[in-house]
Image (tube, grey):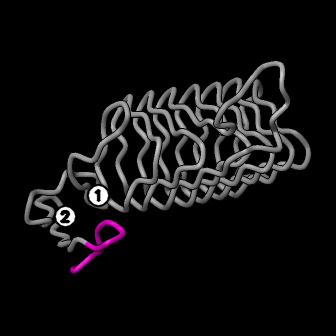
């Protein structure tokens, strides 16, 4: 664990798996049974529940709770104070942990500050969720979505820039084509 940084105020329960090069900052709690990949940056005041899987190279900004049932693939960005849910219709007086709905965030997706991902949704590869958006259904690969409820307003490149109508990125020169699942690379 020599190349893992855990701030002295953070709590990492025995049984949590932390990948090489991962940094865990102030007042964060990682529960037993959580798996964090290599080279992640887990910000201040983050909670990671048991049975959560976080891939390599993820960045989770301050004040995010990642609840049971959430899987983040590699290189996912979770903006400050964004929200995951895991029970669709919770009640304080009724135990419903047997009703956890899984949430999958695919590789390279960006979840903007203060957005909410309602459980059961899949966010596609390199999708870009705008700040404050509320996701209530699946989001296609490379989709750019905003609003409450979220609606698609365009496409985002792998580099994060909004794509023009011809689906050719002016920043990194990648070219895309629309598919039934979202976008696919044509080049490079």
Kindly indicate the quadrant of the structure image that contains residue 98.
top right
Q: Which residue is mark 2?
A: 172
Between 171 and 149, which is closer to the camera in this rendering?
149
The residue drawn where x is 71% and y is 23% is 27
Say left or right for 81 vs 27: left
- Relative image position of residue 154 (x, y in whole percent): 20, 51
Q: Residue furthest right?
A: 14
The residue drawn where x is 33% and y is 37% is 130
Dominant SS of magenta comes to strand
Picture layout, residue 186 above or below residue 154: below
Kindly indicate the quadrant of the structure image that contains residue 108.
bottom left
Say left or right for 48 vs 62: right
Between 23 and 102, which is closer to the camera in this rendering?
102
The residue drawn where x is 83% and y is 19% is 93
Picture layout, residue 102 above or below residue 45: below
Picture layout, residue 78 above or below residue 125: above
Q: Which residue is mark 1?
A: 159
Kindly indicate the quadrant of the structure image that contains residue 41.
top right
Secondary structure of the residue carrying tag 1 is loop
Picture layout, residue 34 above or below residue 148: below
Q: Is residue 186 magenta?
A: yes
Q: Mark 2 and mark 1: span between their CA atoms?
A: 7 Å
- Relative image position of residue 91 (x, y in whole percent): 74, 23
The residue drawn where x is 52% and y is 45% is 59
Q: Is residue 106 magenta?
A: no
- Relative image position of residue 155 (x, y in whole percent): 23, 55
Q: Are marks 2 and 1 in contact (CB under 8 Å)?
A: yes
Please say whether residue 188 is visible from this viewpoint. Answer: no
Region in magenta: 179-188
């Amino acid at each position: 664990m020599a190349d893992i940084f855990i701030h002295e105020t953070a709590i990492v329960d025995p049984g949590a798996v932390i990948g090489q090069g991962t940094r865990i900052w102030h007042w964060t709690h990682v529960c037993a049974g959580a798996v964090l990949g290599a080279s992640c940056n887990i910000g201040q005041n983050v909670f990671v529940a048991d049975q959560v899987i976080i891939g390599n190279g993820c960045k989770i900004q301050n004040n995010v709770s990642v609840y049971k049932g959430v899987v983040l693939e590699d290189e996912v960005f979770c903006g400050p104070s964004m929200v995951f849910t895991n029970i669709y219709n919770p009640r304080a007086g009724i135990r419903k942990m047997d009703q956890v709905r899984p949430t999958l965030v695919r590789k390279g997706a960006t979840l903007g500050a203060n957005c909410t991902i309602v459980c059961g949704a899949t966010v596609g590869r390199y999708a870009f969720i705008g700040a404050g958006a509320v996701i209530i259904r699946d989001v296609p690969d490379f989709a750019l979505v905003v609003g409450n409820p979220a609606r698609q307003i365009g496409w985002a490149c792998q580099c994060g820039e909004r794509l023009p109508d011809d689906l050719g990125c002016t920043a990194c020169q990648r070219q895309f084509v629309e598919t039934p699942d979202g976008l696919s690379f044509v080049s490079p």
